[in-house]
Image: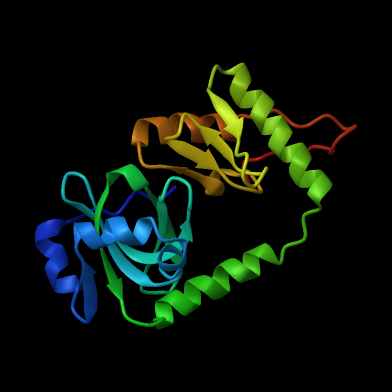
């Protein structure tokens, strides 16, 4: 899994050219307004978190409950190299680009292509429940998100989205991220009565 790219605040000022900076007060207004919050989706942005750490990329997903943002980072070959989870409680400021950029459109296209992969609801539920049992067996406080019934949340600091592979593990804490990822990789195959030899480490 690629390492998180951390851009210190002293260097981010140059990267904010042609962007609109929202103050901390404006961010508080945006995060409490569902319409404005949703408008951040697939926009190029720099998210500043506690400790003056900045994460630059395209806003790929938004959690309307925790106000957390997932920032997709791309390389020169226009491949997504990293997904960074910025916890809503740690976000201090957001610098948002105007309009939809070519990178934003690219990320949107890439994730739309991924969602076209056909996975039946029955299989997704089986994968979810299998992973849920596995994580609980290792004493992790994991619950199913009550809002979507799909996402697995772990102690409000990490979550795993469908289809529940290591690629869908999101956590800002590297130590916790490493432990969860290892558990997902080590999950035993599902019983044949549910799904035959399905693992979650693809």
Question: Which color scheme is applied?
Answer: rainbow
Q: Residue visible at 19% across and 63% down?
A: 23
Q: Residue visible at 25% across and 62% down?
A: 26
- Residue furthest right as drawn: 193
Q: How many numbered discs?
A: 0
Left or right? Give the position of 91 relative to 69.
left
- Residue furthest left as drawn: 10
Q: Nearer the viewer, residue 181 or 42?
A: 42
Left or right? Give the position of 21 relative to 125.
left
Q: How far across and down, in percent of the image, does residue 99 sit? A: 38, 82
Left or right? Give the position of 101 relative to 55.
right
Q: How far across and down, in percent of the image, does residue 125 sit? A: 76, 41
Q: How far across and down, in percent of the image, does residue 84 sit? A: 39, 52
When asked about the image quadrant of residue 189, the answer is top right
Q: Nearer the viewer, residue 28 or 160?
A: 28
Residue 150 seen in the figure: yes
Q: Nearer the viewer, residue 25 or 129?
A: 25
Residue 198 seen in the figure: no
Q: Residue visible at 63% across and 39% down?
A: 146
**Placement of 158 over or under 63, stated as above or below:** above
Q: How far across and down, in percent of the image, does residue 2 sit? A: 40, 51
When asked about the image quadrant of residue 81, the answer is bottom left
């Amino acid at each position: 899994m690629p390492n998180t790219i951390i851009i210190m605040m002293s260097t981010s000022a140059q990267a904010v050219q042609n962007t609109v900076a929202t103050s901390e007060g404006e961010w508080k207004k945006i995060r409490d307004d569902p319409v404005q919050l949703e408008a951040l989706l697939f926009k190029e942005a720099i998210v500043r978190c506690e400790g003056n750490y900045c994460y630059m990329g395209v806003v790929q997903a938004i959690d309307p409950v925790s106000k957390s943002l997932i920032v997709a980072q791309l390389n020169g070959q226009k491949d997504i190299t990293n997904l960074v989870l910025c916890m809503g409680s740690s976000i201090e400021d957001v610098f948002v680009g105007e309009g939809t950029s070519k990178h934003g459109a690219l990320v949107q296209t890439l994730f739309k292509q991924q969602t076209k992969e056909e996975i039946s609801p029955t299989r997704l539920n089986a994968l979810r429940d299998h992973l849920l049992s596995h994580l609980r067996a290792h004493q992790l406080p994991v619950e199913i998100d009550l809002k979507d019934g799909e996402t697995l949340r772990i102690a409000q600091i990490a979550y795993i989205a469908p289809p529940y592979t290591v690629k869908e593990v999101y956590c800002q804490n590297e130590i916790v991220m490493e432990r969860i990822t290892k558990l997902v990789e080590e999950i035993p195959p599902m019983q044949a009565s549910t799904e035959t030899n399905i693992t979650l480490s693809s």
